[in-house]
Amino acid sequence: MCENRLDNRISWHSCAANSTILPLSAEDRRCEALWDQDMKVIILGAGVIGVTSAWYLAEAGHEVTVIERQPGPGLETSFANAGEISPGYASPWAGPGIPAKAIKWLLMKHPPLILRPALDMAMVRWVLAMLRNCTAGRYALNKGRMVEIAEYSRDALDDLRGRLALDFDHRAKGTLQLFRTERQVEASAKDIEVLRQYGVSYEQLDQDGCIRAEPGLAFSRDRFRGGLRLPGDQTGDCRMFTEQLARHAAQAGVDFRYGVTASRLVAEGGRLSAVETDAGRMAGDAFVVALGSHSPALVRPHGVRLPVYPVKGYSITVPIVDASRAPESTLLDETYKIAITRLGHRIRVGGMAELSGYNNELPPGRRDTLSHCVEDLFPGAGDVSAADYWSGLRPMTPDGPPVLGRAGLPNLYLNTGHGTLGWTMACGSGRVIADLVSGKTPPVDPSGLSIARYRG
C-alpha cells in the first residue's frame, strides 16, 4: 500500500548501500509516480518550525499553505526565547542523576525547576516517561540523535543566511557555560567526555579565561570559578529570523493564512483529506503538524499518541545601557540554568522549567530570578527596570529528541517536540520534513526521530 512507500524507499536505499538491490513492485512504482508529483501541503503552525518547513517544502516544488491562529509568524514559543543556536549543548534533560538534582532545584531560592502539581494525567505520564529515560544508556542514545540533527541544522541555517542575507542580530562568538563552584568545574569532566565523543570543539577556562571570552564578567569575578566554552555555537533573534524567512517564503509563493485556527483533521479513505478551521475547510495532499505543545490534541483522534508536554519557560529582554559590561555572546549560568544572550542592543535572559500545564501567567518571582542572574553576573550592563517580560510553552518530549516524520496516516507528518532547542534545530528539521514529504531520504537518519521510537 502507498502508506508504506516511505518505509519501502528507505529500505531500498539501505539495501542499495549494501549492494543488494531489490526490485520495485507495481505498487512501489505507482507510489514513486505519486511522489514525483508536486503536492498541496498544509502546514499547521507558523512558528520557527512551521516557517522553516514551509520554506524547504516550497523549494522542493510543492504548493504550500500555512495556517496560523496568531496575526503573524513567530508570535508564540518562537517569540522571545533565549536566542541560543547551540548544537554543542544539544542534550536531553533526562539523564543520570537528574531525579536527585530535581529535588535540590525545587528547594532553591531561585529554582530552575518549578512543579505545580495538578490532576493532569498527561503530566504524570510525561514525568514517568522522562524518569525512565534517566539512565546512562538512554541518555547516550538520545543525545546522539539530538546532536546529529542540531549540527545538520546549524549548517542549514548558515546556508540559508548566506543565500537570503537574513539579518536577525546574528553572532558567531560561541557559548560559555559558567561554573560558580569548584564542584561544577569537576563535574564538567563528564560533559567534556561527551563533547570529545561527538567531535565538538571546546575550551576549558579558568576565571581569567572566562573574562577574556566575556569581558563583562570582570565586574563579577568573585561569582564564578571557571567555565566551558564552545566556540562553534551562535546566537540570534528567533522571532526576527522567523518573520524574515516568512516574508521570503511568501514571495516564493507560500500562502500564509494568519488569524485562522485549526480545529480538526478530516480523514477519508484511510488518509487525511482536509483540515477544518474557523475559516472553513481546507483540502490538501499532505499535512505537517508543527503546533508545538498543541500538536498532541490535533492528532490524537487519528490514533497518534504524541508524548509532547508543555514545559513553560520565561525570559526578560533588557535594553543595554553600558555595552562594556554586557555579554558578547551567550552565557549559561550552570547554577540557575539561565541563559544570558547578547542580541544587538539588548540582553535576552531566559530559562527555567515549569510544569504547570497550558498557562502563560507571569508570576513576579520568576522575573526576579532572571533579573538576579543578569545583575549578579553583568552588573550595570542593562536597565532591568525597563525589561520586557515573557513566557512561552516549550514542546518537550520525555526522551529529548524532537518528533519528525510520518505518523499514523500515510499523509500526516509531525515536526514538533523540540523543547528548548527549536531555534537550534529548526532549519535541519524543516529540511528533513521536506525530504520525507517529497519521498527522499534525508542526510540525517530519521528513524531515531520518528514517533515509532515510542512503540512498546
Image (cartoon, grey):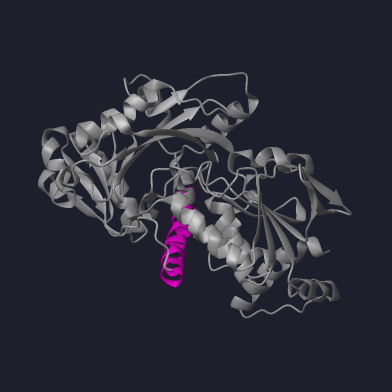
Residue at x-position 70% and y-position 42%: 261
Lateral position of residue 414 relative to residue 191, left or right? right
Lateral position of residue 254 relative to residue 133, left or right? right
Residue 200 to residue 61: above or below: above
Residue 437 to residue 391: above or below: below
Lateral position of residue 393 relative to residue 265, left or right? left
Instruction: State whether residue 445 appears in this view.
Output: no
Residue at x-position 64% and y-position 63%: 254
Is 176 a magenta residue?
A: no
Q: In which quarter of the image is the C terminus?
A: top right
Residue 290 to residue 54: above or below: above
Lateral position of residue 3 relative to residue 53, left or right? right
Count of residue discs: 0
Instruction: State whether residue 142 appears in this view.
Output: yes
Residue 391 point in image, percent of width and height: 46, 33
Residues 43 and 205: in front is 43
Is 157 a magenta residue?
A: yes
Residues 419 and 376: in front is 376
Residue 382 point in image, percent of width and height: 24, 37
Residue at x-position 34% and y-position 52%: 194
Residue 450 to residue 321: above or below: below
Residues 270 and 365: in front is 365
Name the chief secondary structure element in magenta: helix
Residue at x-position 79% and y-position 76%: 33
Q: In which quarter of the image is the N terminus?
A: bottom right
* Location of residue 433 by image quarter: bottom right
Residue 110 point in image, percent of width and height: 33, 24
Residue 366 point in image, percent of width and height: 38, 25
Residue furthest to the right in view is: 269
Magenta region: 142-164
